[in-house]
Image (spheres, rainbow, N blue to C red):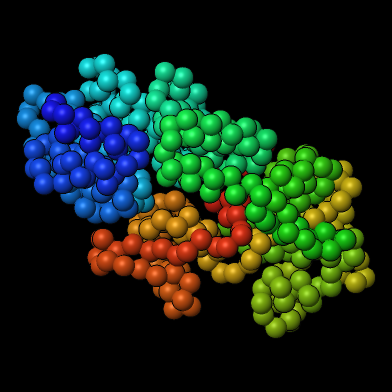
Amino acid sequence: MDSLITAAARALAAGDPLGALNRIALRKDAPALALRGIAMAQLGDFAKAKDLVRAAAKAFGARESVARARCIVAEAELALASRDLGWPLKNLAAARAVLETHGDRLNAAHGRYVEIRRMLLLGQLDDAERLLRELDPSPLPLALQATHELIAAGIAIRRIHTAPARAALDRAMNAARLAGIPALIAEIESAALILNAPAARLIAPGGTCLVRLDEVEDVFASNTLVVDACRYVVRSQGGIVPLTGRVVLFTLARALAEAWPSPVSRDDLIRRAFRLKVDDSLRARLRVEIGRLRKALKVHARIDATSQGFQLAPLHARQVAVLARPMEEEHAAVLAFLADGESWATSALALALGVSQRSVQRALDELAAAGKVQSYGAGRAKRWMTPPLPGIATTLLLPAPLPGN
């Protein structure tokens, strides 16, 4: 490897893409193409970066399997950064196997971190945590040590464990500052802001207020029956009742919780749950749905019929509260993903949300018509993005199990 390639690689490792390009911008040999691709990725031009990395992989000879594997790891990271979640993971697994066989443990670990970050983005927390525990960051460069702690913080945040998250972010910041990479420091600072931003609205008999993630954790740990409108579950210390996909039951549960300790009239429940004009058929349907809700919540609460309507009566909890999104609107889950400031493909959003591409496209079209998102590119290269929601943490809108799942 010649001196210019070595100097460019060191510049990239220090987070200086312009310094790297000053040395190799006009070169077209395979190592230079690969480094140019990484530099363009650091500058945010992912499309150009992909082309350069792929060209580098082709330019390396058949005997240069390690160099090819490194290019595949770089391409996998580019796919993650550009939210191409459909990129074939089997290619990354094969590349890691080559790197480990040839003793390149550094790039093999880097490839594993890319895989774990993808799992974290998709809410596969158990798998991400298991793979992260298998990695020892101590012999790795400081930048990868910071990445390790960032992932650990991300898992803790999704699980709403704020103390471990803060500790991991502190370790990540220490490593990033020692590495002296401004972009990495900025990423960690941005992640730390989530812990201090409003994460939800708490609706309780005493009123409504915005709460941070640590305050949400305190509510979950308290003797409170919580109707969680961020994750569509009802939870207390007795466990969790998922009501995802059971819209009517969840709407009834939330209405009863918001009114607690007072009852809610039958007509109000009908209008809220069915959004139709009250009639005898809907009164009969309400009785059926209340029966289903009683069965679902039998471990946590009773639903008593009164002369005024129906009333929620927790069995063990002393308080009842509703946890709602900071700003409630339609398609909030789509906005939560787009709020990270990255560009997303429709297919990637559908994969992350666990819904069809058609549903996601309808949501994006409505959000675009309202001026809340914007797109660029066309066809399979079309991407969607929006500026981050100012001062709002969207953690509770992302797909991840709550503590106790």
**Residue at figure coordinates x 66%, y 77% from the top left:** 275
Query: Most extreme residue toward the right, as rendered?
Result: 307
- Residue 150: x and y in percent read 50, 36
- Residue 340: x and y in percent read 48, 55
- In the picture, measured across the screen, residue 276 lies left or right of residue 109, that is right
**Residue at figure coordinates x 24%, y 28% from the top left:** 94
Pick whichever, 314 or 336, lies toward us: 336
- In the picture, measured across the screen, residue 400 lies left or right of residue 216, that is left
Pick whichever, 323 or 248, lies toward us: 323
**Residue at figure coordinates x 36%, y 26% from the top left:** 109
- Residue 190: x and y in percent read 53, 49
- In the picture, measured across the screen, residue 354 lies left or right of residue 65, that is right
Q: Is residue 404 above or below residue 338?
A: above
Q: Is residue 339 visible?
A: yes
**Residue 262, image quadrant:** bottom right
Pick whichever, 66 or 323, lies toward us: 66
Q: Is residue 401 above or below residue 269?
A: above
- Residue 258: x and y in percent read 80, 63
**Residue at figure coordinates x 65%, y 54% from the top left:** 197
